[in-house]
Image: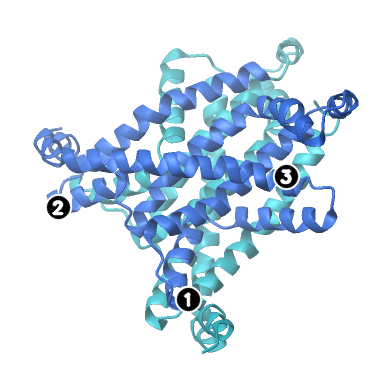
């Protein structure tokens, strides 16, 4: 028991590395602020292309969506981060993460929006158009808001997944929470920093996980 | 060098590809082996936990709920690092492949418990009553009447989850599991060329793209007329 406490809940160690963990947490927050809008907006763009009237636009987009959903996000990140520099172009770690997440997350969000748009009855768009609204107005004020409402639990759960995926940035040395915790572990030879980091993720994400469970059960 | 030539030389270098193909292919078998292990243990454990929850014992439900919530909330990479670096400090040394298997198996178990449980609760109570009144035991009712219906409902969301969790096998490269990405990465640093990464990415697409397309079909099939 004492061994467990000393290895996993060592307050002296935690107090010493706390500033590191704190700056990691800030970085993780910034990553989320950057990556969630990238995914949410990129998803809308992807969905628009994937539901286009023109086959020449629609099919390549659907293929790209499946293609980027087949890649583990970490492979995308490493591909951009470690592959591109061989072309002679330096890629900052943050940039590699942003590009990889744009490709991956907008495919996932795009699929969710697409399912949402499908769930809106055709009559809604027809009625809106017949009142004289333009196609854009119909989309922005009538069909899209309903689509979002219908897939809200999926959007939320995808956002949680995205927050969890920010830990992958640690692999390319972005100093986010998990990276700082792992660094602190190797400096102190003690696992407590990792436990604290896991605890922080848990405290932030657990309420959201609960919320999704409730939303899903209510909508069903 | 022309930029196009340089691009081909960097990402589609036939010479490098020929030399490192066997190594990257070796990673494919590790990925497939670990993937099958994670899927089987994760889904089985998830189903058993969901089944245990139907008993309605509080002493059982509370730990199950905590397990499910914790493993749904924690980032898989954090779980992997805690197990891989934390356990040896208390005298438990596990090979990296086993750590990967336990971590992802637990994550998949948590998510699939949730999906199975949602399926079970959406089976009308009349099904339980009817089955019990024909003289079936609780266990028979659960596994022969309710679970088959729950599984049907669970298939589309479960397929998606399973695919996205199995893709996390690539995280194994962070703790030295020699799966596709791990092999590609070491070939990359040996050859100073990005072609092994292209091969690795290609293998992931070969493995996962058919699964993703199949899940699209499944989703469409199960959404017709059943809701």
Q: How is the image coloured?
A: by chain
Residue B179 visible, this orientation: no
Residue A184 in the image: above or below residue B110:
below
Q: How far from the left and from the top, in percent, is residue A163? A: 44, 39
The cyan-tinted chain is B
Q: Which residue is mark 2?
A: A187
Disc 1 to disc 2, C-alpha distance: 32 Å
Q: Earlier in the sequence, mark 3 or mark 2?
A: 3
Q: How far from the left and from the top, in percent, is residue B56? A: 52, 14
Q: Which residue is mark 3?
A: A48
Proximity of marks 1 and 2: CB atoms separated by less than 8 Å: no
Task: Using a 10 Å C-alpha cutoff, classify the residue at mark 1 as few (fewer than 14 neighbours), some (14 to 19) or many (20 or more).
Answer: many
Disc 3 to disc 2, C-alpha distance: 48 Å
Q: Is A166 displayed left or right of B158 in the figure?
A: left
Q: Which residue is mark 1?
A: B194
Secondary structure of the residue carrying tag 1 is: loop
Looking at this view, name the residue that lies furthest to the left: A12
Q: How far from the left and from the top, in percent, is residue B160? A: 63, 43
Kindly identify which chain the residue marked by label 3 belongs to: A
Residue at point 48%, 64% (across, down): A80
Circle on res. B163: none
Disc 1 to disc 3, C-alpha distance: 33 Å
Residue B112 visible, this orientation: yes
Identify the colour of chain A in the image: blue
């Amino acid at each position: 028991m004492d061994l467990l406490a000393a290895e996993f809940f060592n307050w002296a160690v935690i107090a010493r590395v706390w500033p590191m963990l704190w700056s990691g947490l800030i970085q993780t927050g910034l990553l989320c602020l950057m990556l969630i809008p990238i995914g949410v907006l990129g998803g809308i763009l992807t969905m628009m292309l994937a539901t286009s009237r023109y086959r020449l636009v629609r099919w390549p987009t659907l293929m790209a969506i499946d293609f980027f959903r087949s890649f583990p996000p970490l492979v995308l990140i490493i591909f951009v981060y470690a592959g591109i520099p061989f072309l002679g172009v330096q890629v900052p770690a943050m940039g590699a993460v942003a590009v990889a997440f744009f490709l991956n997350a907008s495919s996932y969000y795009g699929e969710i929006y697409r399912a949402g748009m499908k769930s809106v009855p055709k009559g809604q768009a027809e009625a809106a158009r017949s009142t004289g609204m333009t196609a854009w107005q119909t989309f922005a004020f009538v069909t899209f808001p309903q689509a979002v409402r219908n897939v809200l639990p999926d959007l939320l759960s995808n956002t949680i997944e995205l927050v969890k995926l920010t830990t992958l940035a640690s692999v390319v040395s972005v100093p986010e929470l998990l990276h700082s915790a792992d660094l602190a572990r190797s400096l102190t030879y003690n696992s407590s920093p990792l436990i604290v980091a896991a605890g922080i993720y848990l405290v932030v994400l657990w309420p959201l996980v609960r919320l999704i469970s409730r939303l899903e059960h209510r909508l069903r | 060098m022309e930029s196009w030539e340089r691009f081909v030389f960097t990402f589609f270098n036939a010479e490098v590809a020929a030399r490192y193909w066997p190594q990257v292919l070796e990673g494919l078998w590790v990925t497939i082996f670990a993937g099958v292990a994670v899927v089987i243990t994760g889904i089985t454990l998830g189903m058993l936990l969901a089944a245990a929850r139907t008993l309605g014992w509080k002493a059982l439900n509370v730990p199950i709920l905590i397990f499910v919530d914790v493993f749904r909330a924690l980032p898989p990479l954090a779980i992997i690092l805690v197990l891989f670096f934390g356990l040896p400090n208390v005298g438990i040394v596990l090979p990296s492949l086993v750590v990967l298997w336990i971590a992802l198996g637990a994550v998949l178990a948590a998510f699939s418990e949730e999906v199975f449980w949602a399926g079970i609760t959406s089976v009308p109570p009349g099904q339980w009553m009817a089955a019990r009144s024909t003289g079936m035991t609780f266990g028979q009712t659960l596994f022969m009447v309710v679970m088959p219906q729950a599984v049907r409902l669970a298939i589309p969301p479960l397929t998606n989850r399973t695919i996205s969790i199995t893709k996390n096998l690539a995280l194994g490269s962070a703790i030295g599991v020699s799966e596709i990405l791990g092999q590609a990465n070491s070939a990359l640093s040996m050859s100073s060329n990005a072609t092994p990464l292209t091969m690795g990415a290609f293998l992931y697409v070969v493995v996962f793209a058919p699964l993703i397309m199949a899940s699209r079909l499944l989703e469409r099939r199960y959404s017709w007329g059943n809701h």
